[in-house]
């Protein structure tokens, strides 16, 4: 047996491995991620390395391969666990070890600590005064100002910046006084803190019976040494965050730390303050707006026990706490938990794996109003424990939801983008000076077409996902490559309104202004939020009632409560149903449920109008009824029938090449290589052009592989990797890159 080992994890070339023989006595204990002592370089130099691969094949002459001396004993450090986690991610997601290590060791580049300097007086006051009068006589103005400040505040240390700034004393003058022993300059290192608690403390709530039940169950499992995964299914305002706080409290009392993941977009000041007011300075935050220095310091604080809780997006999972005891993933259904660069990991899966790697384990708690099919399926099949919170604790009644049939509108001669019902309710709200949100679902707008007369959508007969329009008027399936010509009239109803839907936020804004010239409109989309802080600015202005209407894309459905919003209009709700991938219905249901939940947060009852060409679609009906379980049953049946995740698993092998023909030839060859293995019950689809077929002149194509067991896919991936490496060693594939994506989330 041989082990491939990395020696220097801080080095650029962490992917460089060195091979060592595993002596018989260590075969049982050596494992991936384990730290070991090895001879390195000349003489009897000994270094610590980490095993990243075990193999039976020597890379070269076996007689020249040195032997591992011993495994490193002692406590397992946060670093050891990170490296084990990286090894797991490399294998599970098919990335290089360096990409995996860079993911788990994000802020490893050392940053200088921030330093504050202070100045104080070293002379007795009498002597200082004499010196001061001397300066006055000699007209040494700068020294005079500095000495006066020090004499007037004998017990204070004066910040250096104050003296060079406000007092306008040069640093040379300060240095001269310091050299003469008149003043002392002290330096103090400190951690950069990205946010400060605002002082207000947050009283602990008495938990409801439902909430207490969750806390008790998790605590009991913890006491019995079980570290489980839990899903809290509860609408917004049902008290999930309060449960998280109680659970974190308990874990901290046990001397452990907590990681809280929230989607970046929800990382608002309000959310953070909930935690800061409870835990004060023991909490910190990680996100993309922090400077490298701030990021580095938060990692140091976690390592050194300066904080117990970190809040952040998916990368916060890799916070090097000495003893993580709980990992919470709020809004676990959010797509941002899936990485779109190699390794294409999902935070949920990595959190569960991390909890297994930790010496004492950690509880994993997922929360959502609209759980991902993955999480709910796991709950239904007994892999994780399910809790439900059914009551809204914030008061406010659930809104009245109506569906407006857009086919009906067309028949009635209404060509406006507002249905008659939505129009009528808008008029009413403007009269009452209440606020309206108009939401356009722009997801999956990659050139789909449909019939505006009957709502018919053109789908792939093999994959049951929408076809999308390509150049030359062809309709194409992104999974299998099936193609057909774009029809001129609808095959279902004969209507000639077969078109792509192109309404955007700008167009909606214009329509509102056309019908209601006096009404003030704010618009939030990719265009209006390009500059930093504009997102908060628009939401702030709307909260201050500076406008009657907020028009926007999915950005407006998250976070923030607007108590005066009593009407939400969802225009073209089914837009995301046309997305050409198997998650289209799930995403539609989640977006509609969230958007509908925006109405009636305050005292007044709210209305929601969902406009749709497919008003009978189960994801629209279930969202209107706020019926998660109904939706789940329909959707899981579809996934089961077509063998999509989470019932089955899917791997996409993505090939990128400048030369289209070369890429297709290689992709076709790859499929043949996989098929040769004759693994039963595995389905191969493609190669076909990827959802975005070409970026920067590089062609992208994909092969999809479906299997009931994730391990089969991982093994197939291993085989493909080996095959690719073999070709690369012979000098082929210079123009081709291959990536893997398991249970893809976007496409
Ligand atoms: P979620 O995270 O599910 O959206 P929160 O935990 O934010 O729900 O709770 C919603 C609101 O209800 C918050 O204002 C919170 O302070 C309040 N709340 C939560 N639990 C309780 C409780 N047991 N008693 C009183 N108020 C509560
Ligand atoms: Zn039709
Ligand atoms: Zn297809």
Image: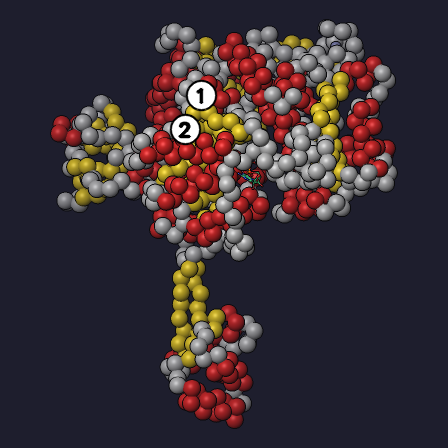
Report the residue at 63% width, 40% height from top.
Answer: 560
Ligand 1 falls in quadrant? top right
Looking at the image, is 484 positioned above or below residue 553? Answer: above
Front-most of 437 and 225?
225
Q: Residue furthest bottom?
A: 137
| Residue at the spot of label 2 | 229
Horizontal side of 165 relative to 733 (left or right) equals right
Q: Does label 2 or label 1 sit earlier along the sequence? A: 2
Q: Position of residue 608 (x, y in %)?
A: 72, 28
- Disc 2, disc 1: CB below 8 Å? yes
Q: Is residue 528 left or right of 431 when viewed as pictured?
A: left
Residue denoted by label 1? 378
Residue 473 x %, y %: 69, 15
Residue name at image x 52 percent, y 48 percent: 203
Residue in the image at 41% along x and 57% along y: 112
Using the rendered image of the protein, determine whether residue 579 is visible from the camera's viewpoint. no
In terms of secondary structure, where does tag 1 sit? helix
Percent of width and height locating residue 319: 40, 42
Residue sitting at 41 percent across and 26 percent down?
93
Considering the image in quadrants, where does the N terminus appear? top left
For numbered disc 2, what is the local secondary structure? strand
């Amino acid at each position: 047996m041989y082990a491939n080992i990395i020696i220097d994890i801080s080095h650029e070339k962490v992917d460089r491995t060195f091979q060592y023989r595993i002596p018989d006595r260590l075969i049982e204990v050596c494992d991936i991620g384990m730290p070991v002592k090895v001879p390195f370089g000349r003489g009897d130099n000994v270094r610590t390395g980490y095993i990243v691969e075990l193999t039976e094949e020597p890379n070269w002459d076996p007689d020249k391969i040195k032997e591992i001396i011993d495994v490193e004993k002692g406590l397992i450090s946060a670093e050891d666990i990170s490296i084990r986690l990286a090894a797991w991610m490399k294998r599970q997601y098919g990335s290089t070890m360096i990409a995996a290590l860079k993911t788990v060791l994000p802020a490893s580049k050392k940053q200088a600590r921030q330093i504050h300097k202070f100045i104080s007086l070293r002379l007795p006051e009498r002597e200082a005064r004499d010196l001061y009068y001397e300066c006055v006589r000699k007209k040494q103005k700068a020294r005079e100002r500095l000495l006066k400040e020090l004499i007037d505040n004998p017990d204070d240390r004066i910040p250096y910046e104050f003296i060079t700034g406000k007092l306008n004393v040069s640093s040379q003058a300060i240095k001269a006084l310091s050299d003469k022993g008149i003043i002392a300059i002290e330096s103090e290192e400190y951690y950069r803190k990205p946010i400060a608690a605002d002082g207000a403390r947050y009283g602990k709530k008495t938990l409801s019976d439902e909430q207490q039940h969750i806390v008790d169950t998790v605590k009991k499992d913890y006491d019995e040494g079980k570290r489980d995964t839990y899903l809290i299914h509860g609408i917004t305002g049902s008290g999930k965050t309060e449960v998280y706080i109680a659970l974190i409290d308990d874990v901290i009392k046990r001397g452990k730390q907590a990681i809280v993941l929230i989607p970046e977009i929800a990382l608002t000041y309000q959310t953070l303050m909930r935690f800061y007011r409870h835990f004060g300075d023991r909490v910190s935050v990680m996100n993309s707006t922090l400077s490298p220095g701030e990021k580095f310091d938060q990692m140091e604080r976690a390592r050194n026990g300066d904080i117990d809780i970190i809040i952040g997006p998916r990368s916060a999972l890799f916070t090097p706490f000495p003893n993580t005891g709980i990992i919470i993933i709020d809004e676990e259904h959010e797509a941002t938990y899936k990485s779109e660069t190699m390794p294409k990991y999902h935070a949920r899966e990595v959190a569960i794996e991390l909890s297994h790697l930790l010496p004492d384990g950690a509880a994993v708690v997922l929360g959502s109003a609209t759980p991902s099919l993955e999480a709910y399926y796991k709950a239904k099949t007994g892999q994780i424990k399910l809790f439900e919170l059914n009551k809204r604790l914030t008061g406010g009644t659930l809104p009245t939801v109506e569906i407006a049939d857009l086919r009906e509108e067309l028949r009635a001669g209404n060509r406006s983008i507002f249905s008659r019902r939505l129009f009528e309710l808008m008029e009413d709200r403007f009269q009452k000076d209440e606020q309206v949100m108009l939401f356009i679902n722009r997801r999956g707008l990659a050139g789909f077409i449909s019939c505006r007369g009957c709502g018919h959508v053109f789908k792939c007969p093999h994959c049951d996902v929408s076809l999308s329009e390509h150049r030359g008027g062809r309709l194409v399936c992104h999974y299998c490559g099936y193609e057909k010509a774009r029809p001129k009239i609808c095959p279902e109803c004969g209507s000639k309104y077969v078109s792509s839907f192109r309404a955007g936020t700008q167009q909606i804004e214009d329509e509102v202004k056309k019908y209601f010239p006096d009404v003030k409109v704010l618009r939030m989309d990719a265009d209006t939020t390009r500059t930093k802080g504009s997102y908060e600015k628009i939401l702030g202005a709307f909260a201050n009632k500076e406008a009657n209407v907020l028009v926007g894309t999915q950005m407006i459905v998250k976070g923030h409560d607007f108590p005066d919003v009593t009407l939400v209009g969802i225009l073209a709700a089914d837009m995301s149903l046309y997305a050409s991938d198997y998650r289209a219905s799930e995403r539609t249901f989640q977006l509609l449920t969230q958007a509908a939940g925006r109405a009636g947060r305050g005292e007044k009852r709210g209305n929601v109008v969902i406009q749709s060409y497919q008003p009978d679609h189960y994801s629209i009906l279930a969202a209107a009824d706020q019926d998660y379980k109904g939706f789940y049953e329909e959707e899981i049946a579809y996934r089961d029938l077509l063998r999509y995740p989470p019932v089955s698993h899917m791997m996409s092998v993505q090939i990128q090449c400048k030369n289209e023909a070369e890429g297709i030839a290689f992709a076709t060859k790859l499929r043949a290589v996989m098929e040769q293995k004759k693994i039963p019950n595995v389905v191969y689809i493609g190669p076909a052009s990827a959802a975005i077929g070409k970026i920067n002149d590089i062609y992208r194509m994909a092969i999809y592989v479906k299997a009931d067991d994730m391990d089969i896919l991982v093994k197939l991936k291993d085989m493909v990797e080996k095959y690719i490496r073999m070709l690369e060693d012979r000098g082929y594939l210079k123009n081709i890159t291959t990536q893997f994506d398991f249970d893809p989330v976007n496409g």
